[in-house]
Image (tube, helix red, strand yellow):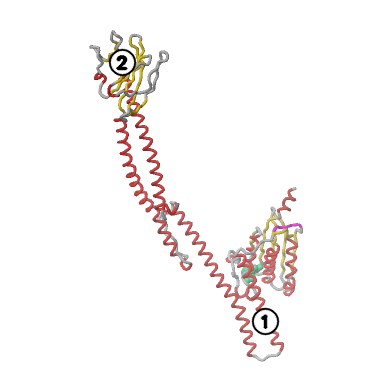
Amino acid sequence: MRNLLGKSLRSRLTILYGLLLTLALALYAGGTSVYFLHNLRQQLDLSLNRDIETVEGLLSLAPDGHLEIGSEEGEAREGDLGRGYLLEVWSGNGVLLYRSDELNGAAMGQPVHLNGNRWREAPHTVRLPNGMRVRVASRLHRIEGQPLVLRLGVSEEPLWQQFWEMVGVMSIGLPITVLLIGLTGYMVAGRALRPVDLMARHAAKISAERLDDRLTISNPDDELGHLGRAFNMTLGRLQESFDQLRRFTADASHELRTPLTAIRSVGEVALQKAGGVPYYRDIIGSMLEEVNRLTRLVESLLTISRADAGQIELHQTTVNALELVQEAATLLESLAEEKQQTVVVEGNPNLDVWADRLILRQAVINLLDNAVKYSPVGGSIHVDVSVDNHTVQIAFQDSGPGIPVEHRDKVFQRFYRVDEARTRAEGGTGLGLSIVKWAVSVNGGSIEFDSEPGQGCTFTMRLPLNKIQNATEKL
Ligand code: ADP
């Protein structure tokens, strides 16, 4: 069907429009012609009825009972009927009293059989043997008490001639009208669709290297303008993701290079120097430290890229918030002990959340790890688990340097560090908080922090209270 209608939208629209128009005009022309014919016939019937009255006035009976038409001399004179009129007169008992010569003996209807005093015959059309169509009107007439039936006919041929003339005019006019309107429609469709063509050509030129290019929109308020705007917005989002991906790849390569360079230079120096076992132990120790850093980095990168690709499947279960935090704190106990820090975990032991345990545990570990990393030796870390309006809140408060206000919006971005030198020295990858943000949001929660410079900071994780627990609380 599509091939039949042509390839371009423009020709498809024009052809469909043309077909519909032809159909509508043909119906209209047909309807008008039939109405016209009906009207002409009605007029003919009216004049026949008038004329039949005239004929009635012309009829009389001769003293011998013979029928006379318009006669003073006792002879029928058909000329009185007027030209083109055909007449039949029947007696009440079905005897044909008169028939016009032009009828050549042909009847203008069934023989008459009067049944009582009423006679009714609707105006009708008969076709004579010579092919002529005749319109016939009938009437019951009485002369001196004797019933007679008059049938007066007149040729319908002039009427049909008018009808066919009208049909002829319409048959010529219809294709011309359709052609003219079709051509106009084709041009109008071309004009209307030109912006689409321009947009398509422009869009075809936009490549990954030219994602900052945008479509020119001549009329932003019409449908094509909306389409163009939507396309430009998609391009904007695409450009943002491309930029993010480029930044991520560049940052990741840079992060990977740092520990690799450190391992290589430590190794090169060790090779040049001759040293004893303690020396080599020391070298291997610092190399392993860099390898650990690399491993952490690669693991974080893997988590982020799998999360971005939507490859991480959530296995949500009921997780007790306080238990989860205690478990993570146990894992980091040795790190905190190294820095003689006190870690206190307390709060409501009965609060459950509906979450993927492993993912949420990673988020808690990252926050605790940061608290230990950035709090000074001898510092203290306090974690509190509470509930507020069906939301479980886990607050991680540390005694570190805090985070200055100007970095507030950026700390959750990938590879963002407040203090480059210090963070690297602490072995940070710059990915911890972005993983926290992702882990909390996939579990339906949020994360934010409060910080006073020099007073440490408090990261607060908010997660919806487990639905089952929510329901039991309501009971
Ligand atoms: P990193 O692995 O480098 O710690 P994060 O994404 O976890 O990366 O943190 C981003 C940055 O935010 C860190 O480099 C650090 O400067 C700052 N930061 C995070 N947590 C804390 C904290 N508890 N105290 C002070 N600064 C922090």
Residue 286 - label = 1
Residue 56 - label = 2
Q: Is residue 198 left or right of residue 334?
A: left
Residue 186: x and y in percent read 36, 51
| Amino acid carrying mark 1 in the image | Ser
Q: Is residue 428 left or right of residue 236?
A: right
| Ligand 1 lies under 8 Å from the Cβ of mark 2 | no
Task: Say which of 190 and 259 sits in front.
Answer: 190
In this view of the protein, can residue 453 be seen by the observer? no
Q: Comparing marks 2 and 1, which lies closer to the viewer?
A: 2
Q: On screen, 260 above or below 444?
A: below
Q: Which residues are magenta?
A: 350-354
Q: Residue furthest front?
A: 105
Residue 32: x and y in percent read 36, 35
Quadrant of the picture in which ligand 1 is shown: bottom right
The verdict on residue 230 being magenta is no
Q: Residue furthest top?
A: 63
Residue 54, by quadrant, is top left
Please report whichever mark, 2 or 1, sits nearer to the chain's N-terminal start: 2
Task: Say which of 330 and 197 sits in front.
Answer: 197
Label 1 secondary element: helix
Residue 139, by quadrant, is top left
Q: Main secondary structure of the magenta part?
A: strand
Label 2 secondary element: helix
Q: Residue furthest right?
A: 349
Residue 164: x and y in percent read 31, 35
| Amino acid carrying mark 2 in the image | Glu
Q: Is residue 43 left or right of residue 219?
A: left
> Gap between marks 2 and 1, in whole Å?
136 Å
